[in-house]
Image (cartoon, helix red, strand yellow):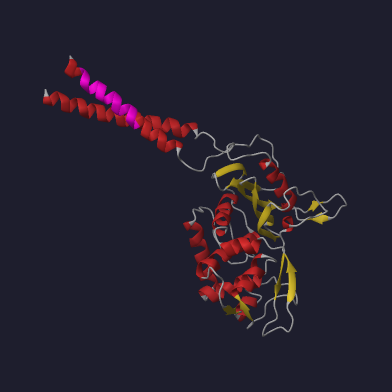
Amino acid sequence: MRKDKMPVKAGSCLMIGILLIILNLVLSLPDSVYAENSGEDVIPNAKAAILYEVTTGTVLYEKNADMQLAPASMTKVMTAILVLEANPELEGELTVDERAVSHYYCSSMEPLRHLYAGEVISYEDCLNYLLIPSGNEAGTAFAFELAGDMSEFAEQMTEKAKELGCENTEFRDPTGISPSNITTPRDMAKIAEYALTFDKFREIVGKTEGTVPASNKREEGFDYQNTNELLAHSDLYENPYEGYIKGVKTGWTPSAGYCFTGYMEKDGLKWISVVMGVMDSAQAADGTAIRGDLPETVNLLRLTDGVTADDLKQPINGFLIAAAIVIAVLIIGIVIFIYRKKHRREM
């Protein structure tokens, strides 16, 4: 009798041990979902969006976060990533390829305020011009400089997106002009999170203005302002997050609508917001038209008010716990069966 109980007792101890190990592994899984969505659409004018907290890996809010949409000039975040991976300190200069300013590759340039074929510009000035006022020819110039070919550079952009875990992203150009560029809010948040690991990227996207300097092709430089108006005070709409927002990139084309990937540091937390597909301009109190993605982003960020790191430490999904328990029971059953079979043979 005493020997017959030994397998059961040993199996019980083993069962408890395995169960504790598996539950510990499950409870340590990252990327918990806060599930703040109460059914209310806080950004009714956006087709899709996501609000993600970096330090805890928590999605606070999402709306059609896996919907594929054109990112417009948010594309330039990935362009900047390839530039910074090739030259993290932005050392040296490049010469603008004549193809980079051709109508075929770069159909959208501000008259008299753009780069010229053959112009020599530093890597740092060129990346500033790419990210702050969204200079399209800076993106095409980098593509020809680094890859020698536009399609090759676009393929590298897509491959990098896949490396970052972006499952629904594909790039056809480095600027966002092409409507064939596609991504999702979730993928765009992953791209922005990686871009923000570069010191130079964080520095540049936080600037409100900059200058393209005089060069071998221009006697005088020209100044520009950041298209991200949330970085500075505006009298047109309320922005309680002035000073907290540190970047990242706006976007607009007729087909994509207004888009914005933002980065905010507040109360010890780091928030990445993505709003896509806002098709109409918003109206300020005085009737002035403003970018529709900016007030939508403010509405999205209001969800962060009062949220702390402790609030974001949510229990893991119940389905995962149940699955872990089932697996544990199956493993335990197999172990006990083998143990008993071996014990009978020894008797």
Say left or right for 346 vs 282. left
The quadrant of the rendering that contains the N terminus is top left
- Residue 61 in the image, given as x and y percentages of width and height: 62, 42
Q: Looking at the image, which residue is at 67% across and 48% down?
A: 47
Q: Is residue 15 magenta?
A: yes
Q: Residue at x 65, y 69 (%)?
A: 128
Residue 332 x, y percent position in the rendering: 30, 29
Magenta-drawn segment: 5-18
Question: Against 149, is 314 above or below?
Answer: above
| Residue at the extreme top | 1
* Residue 190 in magenta stretch: no
Q: Position of residue 148 (x, y in %)?
A: 52, 76
**Does 343 sit left or right of 279 as displayed?**
left
Q: Answer with the quarter of the image where residue 192 lies.
A: bottom right
- Identify the residue at the far front of this view: 268
- Residue 69 occupies which quadrant of the picture? bottom right
* In-image side of 347 versus 237 (left or right): left
Q: What secondary structure is the magenta-colored segment mainly?
A: helix
In this view of the protein, can residue 65 be seen by the observer? Answer: no
Count of numbered tags: 0
Q: Position of residue 272 (x, y in %)?
A: 61, 50
| Quarter placement of the C terminus | top left
Q: Is residue 210 visible?
A: yes
Instruction: Compare residues 45 and 114 and report the one nearer the observer.
Output: 114
Q: What residue occupies the far right of the structure in this picture? A: 286
